[in-house]
Amino acid sequence: MTRIDKVMAGLKAAGKKGMFIYITAGVPDAATTIEAVRQAKRAGADVIELGLPFSDPMADGPVIQTASVAALKNGMTLAGALDIVREIRKFSDIPLIGMGYINNMYHYGLERFVRDFKAAGMDGVIIPDLPHEESGGMRRICAAQDFVLAEFITPGTTEPRMEQTCRDAAGFIYCVSNNGVTGVKKVDYHPIGQVCAKARKYTDTPLAVGFGIGSAEAAVEAAEEADAVIVGSAVVRCLLDHRMDDAVALIREMRQALDARYAV
C-alpha cells in the first residue's frame, strides 16, 4: 500500500473525510513551502498536493497561475521540487502527490521523473492535461514503481468513460466539481455528488472533490458524497500574500467543520 492508500483507509475506518491541501512549490520560496507543509499537517491536512510550477497551467485559475509564474521567476524547477520533497521527508510521512503538466515531464523524461520523485519520497502525480485515453504509457511506468497516477472524472464524464477510468484508477480519483478552472468560486456541488454516487458502482478507490473550495462551508458541501476534498487556491492566495497564519487558520477551520459534520 502507498502512503495515500494507508491514510485514506485509516480515514474511512475512522468515519472521517480526508483533506488534500495544494501548495505550489517555491511560493513564495522553497523554505516557506516546506514550512507550509509542516503547518498544514499540524492543522489537519491528510495529504499534500505539491504544485510543480509550469508556464502554461491550463487547468488552473488566476491564483495558481500567478503562483506558478512567481515560482518560476524565483528559479523553481523540477530539481528544486525534488529537493523540497526530500526536505519534507526528513520530518513528515504525510502523503505527497505532485500536480504538474505533461510537457515538463516529457522534457525531464517520464521514467526518470517517476523514478526520481519516487526515490525522493513522493507518492504519485496528478497530470490534468494527460487524457485517460493517452495515459497508458505513463500508467504502466507509474504502476511499475507503485506510484499513483490520479484519474479524473467530471460532471461531463459519460458513463462508459467513467467505467473505464474507474477500472484503471489507483490511489484516489480526482472529481472535478465544475467545468471551469481552479479557484475559489460559488459551486453547486450536487452534480459532482451525483457523479461520485455513480462512480461507486465501478470502483472502491477513494473519491476526492476539488475546484472551487474556499471555505469550511464549501468543504462540507463538497464532501457530502466524496471521501475527501481538495483545497488549493484559497491556501495559495494566503501564501502568495505572506499570510501563513491565515492559511493555517483556514485549514484548521475546514478540518474542524468536516469532523463536526462527518466524523463518526
Image: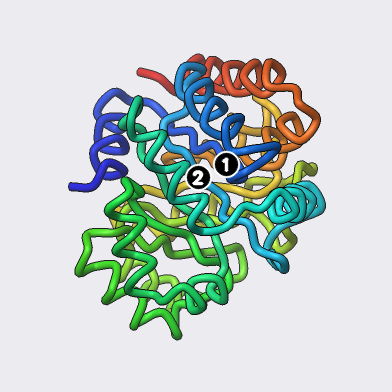
Disc sitting over residue 222 in the figure: none
| Vertical side of 69 occupied by 202: above or below | below
Q: Is residue 48 left or right of residue 95?
A: right
* Residue furthest to the front: 75
Q: Determine the image quadrant of residue 235.
A: top right
Disc 1 residue type (three-letter): Tyr
Which of these two is toward me, 142 or 116?
116
Q: Determine the image quadrant of residue 54.
A: bottom right
Which of these two is toward me, 135 or 17?
135
Q: Position of residue 218 (x, y in %)?
A: 67, 33
Q: Position of residue 251 (x, y in %)?
A: 59, 23
Secondary structure under tag 2 reads strand
Q: At x 30% / y 55%, what residue is drawn?
A: 118
Disc 2 + disc 1, Cβ < 8 Å:
yes
Q: Which residue carries the number 2 mark? A: 49
Q: At x 31% / y 31%, what residue is drawn?
A: 93
Q: Which residue carries the number 1 mark? A: 22
Q: Position of residue 189 (x, y in %)?
A: 65, 46
| Vertical side of 173 occupied by 227: above or below | above
Number of numbered markers: 2
